[in-house]
């Protein structure tokens, strides 16, 4: 596991999700989801009001996909989020439908998969689709 806190912060002060992706620049509603674009150019369906202050660790899965573990100080277990990276920067952070299953890239689409369906993110156009059953 790559610990974001050790690799990016020499003072060893925990880095937060907000430090990683910035503040909300604007939001749009798609179906039942609020999709935010951040000041660092990241798209996410994570509520930064709730999770922005959580400390993070990153575990790379491939060159451009990985997991972000976000944890509040009082939480027993971290929240696992899926991430898509371009040139070492986080471009998409996504939750999933139901229990975690994995994430991958297919063409221009980042797929965050859970047992109840998938969230599909086109990282070229910024489109989001909830494909659940």
Image (cartoon, rainbow, N blue to C red):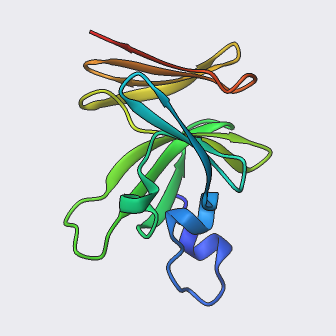
Please give the name of the residue rendered at 24% of the width and 29% of the height, measured from the top-left corner: 98
In this view, which residue lies farthest toward the right? 87
Q: Is residue 18 left or right of residue 131?
A: right
Q: Is residue 66 left or right of residue 99?
A: right
Residue 85 position in % (x across, y down): 68, 41
Please give the name of the residue rendered at 54% of the width and 24% of the height, measured from the top-left corner: 104
Residue 37 position in % (x across, y down): 63, 44
Q: Is residue 126 left or right of residue 97?
A: right
Q: Quadrant of residue 100?
A: top left
Front residue of 15 and 4? 15
Front residue of 111 and 65? 111
Residue 80 vertical position relative to residue 119 in the rendered view, above or below? below
Residue 130 vertical position relative to residue 65 in the rendered view, above or below? above
Q: Quadrant of residue 131?
A: top left
In this view, which residue lies farthest toward the bottom? 11
For the C terminus, which image quadrant?
A: top left
Please give the name of the residue rendered at 69% of the width and 13% of the height, measured from the top-left corner: 107
Please give the name of the residue rendered at 19% of the width and 66% of the height, measured from the top-left corner: 76
Residue 33 position in % (x across, y down): 41, 31
Residue 102 position in % (x across, y down): 41, 28
């Amino acid at each position: 596991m790559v610990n974001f806190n050790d690799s990016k912060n020499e003072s060893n002060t925990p880095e937060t999700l907000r430090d990683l992706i910035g503040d909300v620049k604007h939001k749009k509603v798609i179906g039942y989801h609020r999709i935010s674009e951040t000041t660092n150019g990241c798209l996410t369906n994570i509520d930064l009001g709730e999770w922005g202050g959580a400390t993070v660790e990153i575990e790379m899965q491939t060159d451009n996909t990985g997991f972000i573990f976000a944890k509040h100080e009082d939480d027993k277990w971290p929240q696992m989020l899926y991430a898509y990276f371009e040139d070492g920067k986080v471009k998409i952070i996504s939750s999933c439908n139901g229990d975690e299953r994995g994430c991958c890239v297919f063409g221009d689409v980042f797929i965050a998969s859970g047992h109840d369906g998938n969230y599909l993110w086109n990282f070229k156009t910024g489109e989001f689709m909830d494909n659940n059953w």
